[in-house]
Image: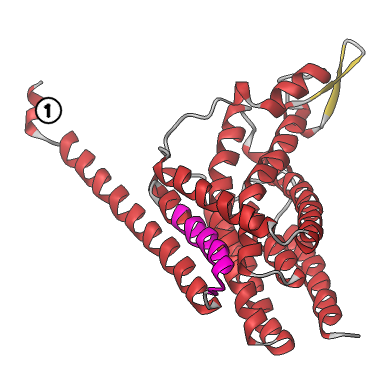
Amino acid sequence: MTSDQLTYLVFGIVIVLALAFDLGLLSKKNTHITLRKALLQTIFWVTLALGFFGFMWVEEGRTVALEYLSAYLMEWSLSIDNIFVFILIFNFFGVKDRFYARVLLIGILMAIVFRVIFITIGIELVERFSWLLYVFGGILVYTGFKMFTAKHDDEVNLQENRVYKMLKKFLPLTPQDGDGKWTMRIDGKKYYTSLFVVVIMLATTDIIFAVDSIPAVFAISQNHLVIYTSNIFAVLGLRSLFFLLKGAINKFGHLQQGIAFVLIFIGAKMLVTFFDIHVPILISLLVIVMSVTLSIVYSISVARKETAEETIEEHSPDKDLH
């Protein structure tokens, strides 16, 4: 058994056992996930991913391990943007709290399947047409600039979502949740419930984000092991991250600028290889960590300042006079 085969085997075993532990001990069907439980689950998945980094360092060497860590941290930070859209979807369809965990789990497992397919196709294309890496780089730079200048509070009109419109066109839908079922019968006719629609939209939303995140991983490493494992670990942590962040969206208003800077940097890193300029993996790791950390710290400080100003304004004597 080769080193890569052993790493894949360990990765598969870890994922299966971790999912069993997460679902069996940390989660129960149709129960409310508290902030404390969400924090424990998030710590669990992050610790697992970092533990796998240590295993890769021993088994695959320093360079591959650092590539994996950089790719994982980048994918993890990009996944936070997924969370904001996930929350909008849940609110739009009025999903009950007790169904959140189950719907998220199925949607995320579907997203993993789609990501594996996308990554496999991407690897095949890059190996056949190496110039595609420069195309990926250009896409990342463009997306980064677009994200940097976009307003975080722009409304997303889910009524105009293409996937939702297509589902309404081809399937009989009902706004009811069927008490947790995917389908239900009304007057003898089969209808697909709102939970079914939410699962499909979660999976397809992740595909849209994958268009940015997967090329970004190729900029960090072309190692198949790094690409697959970093993506899967990051996506599996989405569910706990959702429950951790769903009540604090307004505290991360400037995070997208940090993520945008990462995309621009990664895209530029990919493009400059044309001139035989190669940015060391440690520099990439430092840029990713610093960009995301500083944007989070800045976002929280701005949110606290705004909250303090609102509190002062509410208790202002001038306001009472009016």
Residue 232 x, y percent position in the rendering: 72, 61
Tell me if 248 is positioned left or right of 175 in this view. left
Quadrant hosting residue 205:
top right
Res 237 seen here: no
The residue shown at (69%, 56%) is 132
Q: Which residue is mark 1?
A: 319
The residue shown at (51%, 73%) is 285
Residue 208 x, y percent position in the rendering: 66, 42
Res 89 seen here: yes
Asked if residue 59 lies in the magenta stretch, the reply is no
The residue shown at (76%, 69%) is 224
Residue 230 x, y percent position in the rendering: 68, 66
Q: Secondary structure at mark 1?
A: helix
Tell me if 304 is positioned left or right of 49 in this view. left
Magenta stretch: give its range: 260-278
Prevailing SS of the magenta stretch: helix
Which sits in the foreground, 179 or 93? 93
**Residue extending furthest toward the top:** 187
Characterize the local packing of mark 1: few (<14), some (14-19) or many (20 or more) Cα atoms within 10 angstroms.
Answer: few
Reply above or below: 170 against 65.
Answer: above
Residue 101 x, y percent position in the rendering: 68, 46
